[in-house]
Image (cartoon, helix red, strand yellow):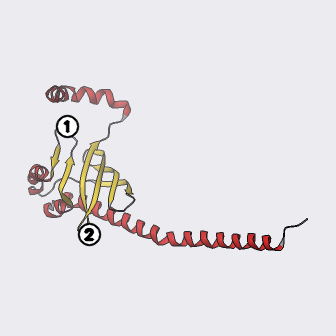
Amino acid sequence: SGTPPEEGKYEETMKKLTILFLATLVFSCKPCEEKLQSEKQNITTILDNWHKAAAVANYEAYFEAMSDESIYIGTDATENWNKKQFQDFAKPYFDKGKAWNFKAIERNIYFSENGKTVWFDELLSTQMKICRGSGVLVQENGQWKIKHYVLSMTVPNDNMDEVVKIKSALEDKILSEKK
């Protein structure tokens, strides 16, 4: 008792259609992956150039990379600035000819489903040793702009108690003011 000839043809046809469908799916995603890699490289270049602009004190290039509604959060608990506030804080450093020098040593970049929002995290080599940055970029008029950036210093877990002792007096005052 074998399979009727019609059923065997049907199964063979379904196998071929499945293979064709899967092949089409795999090859149609290749341009998507290439575009994603290209955009990741574009974001990497934007962030690297942003950090470089600070290192060479290029005030205009540095702040041009940021959205007009951007937020910059620095390492100090009091540093939560909109773009104008951050420009006011940073201007004297840029005027001296050198602001800060951050170089990414590791970076992860993620895209929203619609591809219009990017978030990232980066490990940085800085004058403060290793820091971590994270942020969000959005597309504005066809250009990626930094919308939000957070800079934080890393603290080795084995040294946490020492660091807490160093910063306690100042930050206890801030905590009592925020209550």
Picture residue at 83% right of the left edge, 73% below the top = 5
In the rendered view, tell whether residue 14 sits above or below residue 72. Answer: below
Give the SS element for disc 1. loop
- Which corner quadrant of the image does residue 78 belong to? top left
Label 2: which secondary element: loop
* Left or right side of 33 for 177: left
Mark 2 → mark 1, Cα distance in angstroms: 34 Å
Measuring from the top left, give residue 68's x and y in whole percent: 16, 58
User: Which residue corresponds to mark 1?
Assistant: 77
Q: Whole-percent x and y of residue 141?
A: 23, 68
Please state which of residues 152 and 119 is positioned toward the viewer in this rendering. 119
Please rate how many residues cluster around mark 1, counting C-alpha atoms within 10 Å: few if below 14, some from 14 to 19, many from 20: few
Q: Name the residue under label 2.
A: 142
Question: Which picture quadrant has residue 24?
Answer: bottom right
Q: Which residue is drawn at 29% across and 51% down?
A: 135
Residue type pointed to by label 1? Ala
Callout 2 crowding tier (Cα within 10 Å): few <14, some 14–19, many ≥20: few
Location of residue 166 (image quadrant):
top left
Residue situated in front as seen by the camera: 14 or 38: 14
